[in-house]
Amino acid sequence: MNTPTGRSILVTGGAGFIGSHLVEALADDNEVVVLDDLSGGRREWVDDRATLIEGDVREDQTVADAVDGVDLIFHQAANVSVERSIDSPVDSHETNVDATLCLLEHARRENARFVFASSAAIYGDPETMPIEEADSKHPSSPYGLEKHTADEYCRLYHELYGVETVALRYFNVYGPRQRGGQYSGVIDVFLDQAVRDEDITVHGDGNQTRDFVHVNDVVAANCLAATNGTPGEAYNVGTGESIRIVELAQLVQETTETTSDITHTAARDGDIDRSRPSIEKARTDLGYRPSRSLENELSSLR
Ligand code: NAD
C-alpha cells in the first residue's frame, strides 16, 4: 500500500471500523494521534503505536489540542446512523457538520491537508448509473444532507482559503470490525443468519443493487489522498461494480454452505433502488485501484 511517511497525522474516529484500519496502515511510518469519544469505536482497536485522545470532535478546545502540530487530518468521526439522524437531526448535524467545520478551521490554521470521509448517501436515489461525482444530489436523510454539506465545505475551504481538502465518498464499506448498520450491515446479517441455519431475509424483491467495497481498499484510497488528488475535489470510493442483494444472499449461502433458505420480507421505506459509482475520477487522479472482491473476502468474514 502506498502510505504516507514521516507525517504528523490526526485521525478522528480512529477507534472505529474504518478509522482503526487506517491508523494501523499509518502507524508504521508516521506519528499518529487518534481523537475518538469511543461512542461507537473501541479502545482495543486503536493501534498501540498511536496516541489516543478520548474526546469529542464537537468540543473546540479538544479539537484544537488534537490538531496542534499535525500536517495531515483524516476526518472519519461521525454520527454514522441514518436512523439516529432522522430521530435527532440537530444532534447529528452538530457532529457531522458543525464539528467538520470546526476541524476545517483548525486545518486552515495549521496548514494541514484534510481528507474527509464523505458518503454515497449524498446522492440519494440516483437518476443515472453509474453515479458520477458531478451528478445531482438529493439526499434522503439528514445524514446524507449533513455529509453533502460537509463535503461542500471541504470544496469551499479550498476555494476560499486554499486548504488542501479531498473528500472521499465511500460506498458500502465492509470488512473485519464492521458492525451492523445501514451501509454494509446486510452482509453481517446474512452471514449471521446463514451460520445459524436460519432463513436469510431479503427486504423486498432483492433487486436493489449496492457496491460493496473492502475496508482495505478504502484505507488505500485515504492513503493515496494524503498526497495525490486535486485539492478541493471529491472522489467516489467503491469498486465500480454492484451486486443485487438477492445475489449477495445466494453468495452467502454458497460461501457458508448453509441449509438456510432465502425468504423475502416487506421492502423498507426509503431504501435506495440502485447504487453503482463510476470510480474513473479516483483511478485517474488518485491512482486508486480497488483490489479486493466480495467473492474472495466473504469467507474470511466468518
Ligand atoms: P464507526 O462508527 O465505526 O466509526 C466512527 C467513529 O467516530 C467511532 O469510533 C466513534 O466512536 C467516533 N465518533 C462518533 N462521534 C464522535 C464524536 N462526537 N467525537 C469523537 N468521535 C466520535 O463508523 P465507520 O463505518 O468506520 O465510519 C467512518 C466514517 O466513514 C464516517 O464518517 C462515516 O460516515 C463514513 N462512511 C462510512 C461508510 C461505511 O460503509 N461504513 C460509508 C460511507 C461513509
Image: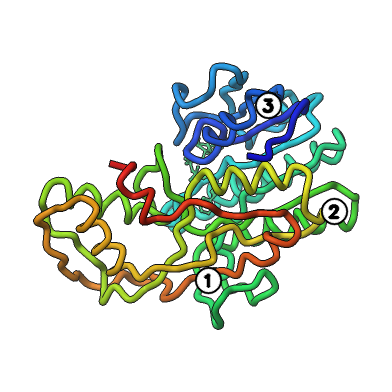
> Mark 1 and 2 residues: CB-CB less than 8 Å, in contact?
no
> Mark 2 and 3 residues: CB-CB less than 8 Å, in contact?
no
> Which residue does the image show at 80% across and 32% down from the upper left?
71
Expressed as whole percent of the image width and height from the top left, the position of residue 216 reads 52, 43
Q: Does residue 279 lie above or below 7 as drawn? A: below
Q: Which residue is mark 3?
A: 62
Q: Amino acid at mark 3?
A: Thr
Q: Secondary structure at mark 2?
A: helix
Note whether ligand 1 is within 8 Å of mark 2. Answer: no
Quick check: 101 left or right of 47?
right
The label number, if any, that marks residue 246 in the structure image: none
Mark 3 Cα-neighbour bin, 10 Å: few <14, some 14–19, many ≥20:
some
Q: Secondary structure at mark 3?
A: helix
> Mark 1 and 3 residues: CB-CB less than 8 Å, in contact?
no
- Between discs 2 and 3, the one toward the N terminus: 3
- Between discs 1 and 3, the one toward the N terminus: 3
Q: Amino acid at mark 1?
A: Gly
Q: Which residue is mark 1?
A: 124
Q: Amino acid at mark 2?
A: His
